[in-house]
Amino acid sequence: MSPKALERGSDWLMDAGLRPTRQRVALAALLIGDGQHRHVTAESLFSDVRRLGESVSLATVYNTLRAFCDAGLLQEVMVDGAKSYFDTNTHDHPHFFWEDENRLSDAPADQLQIVRLPDAPEGAEIASVDVVIRLRRRH
């Protein structure tokens, strides 16, 4: 990893009030080190960090991603209620899920129109609305 990516990752953590441990900085540098937004799974991030020679367990990756979400650095996007993707773009926006590739990408937010939501049941409030548009390639 480049020194610039490591510095960017360390700054990202410190700005969020997280202690920049070696493992956190390595994961942060992979996530935002080049300044581009990413959609990752814990498994894909684990594979990337191991490929760089970092000694990190999959459990540590999961725990770190959870800490990053809790600090507001990442947004968790659930697909099928079982598969979690983590997005470095924390602004509200829709996603495309490419079924054939098990890949998540941003969908154009300016093209989405939600005219009306149903009323929340008694005693509940709407916390958020996630829009995941499932796609598959035409054959």
Image (tube, rainbow, N blue to C red):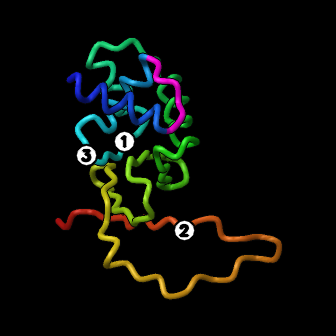
The alpha-carbon separation of the residues under discs 3 and 2 comes to 24 Å
How many numbered badges does the structure rendering display?
3
- Depth-wise, is mark 1 or mark 3 nearer the camera? 3
Say what secondary structure mark 2 lies in.
loop
Tell me where residue 49 appears, x and y as whole percent: 33, 23
The residue that disc 2 covers is 129
Which mark is drawn over residue 40?
A: 1
Where 133 sits versus 119, above or below?
Answer: above
Q: Amino acid type of disc 1? A: Val
Q: Amino acid type of disc 3? A: Gln
Q: Amino acid type of disc 2? A: Val
Q: Nearer the viewer, residue 42 or 30?
A: 30
Say what secondary structure mark 3 lies in.
loop
Tell me where residue 5 appears, x and y as whole percent: 26, 29
Q: Residue furthest bottom?
A: 115
Tell me where residue 109 appears, x and y as whole percent: 34, 71
Closer to the chain start, of discs 3 and 2, is 3
Q: Residue at x 55, y 37 (%)?
A: 66
Closer to the chain start, of discs 2 and 1, is 1
The residue that disc 3 covers is 36
The quarter in which the N terminus is drawn is: top left
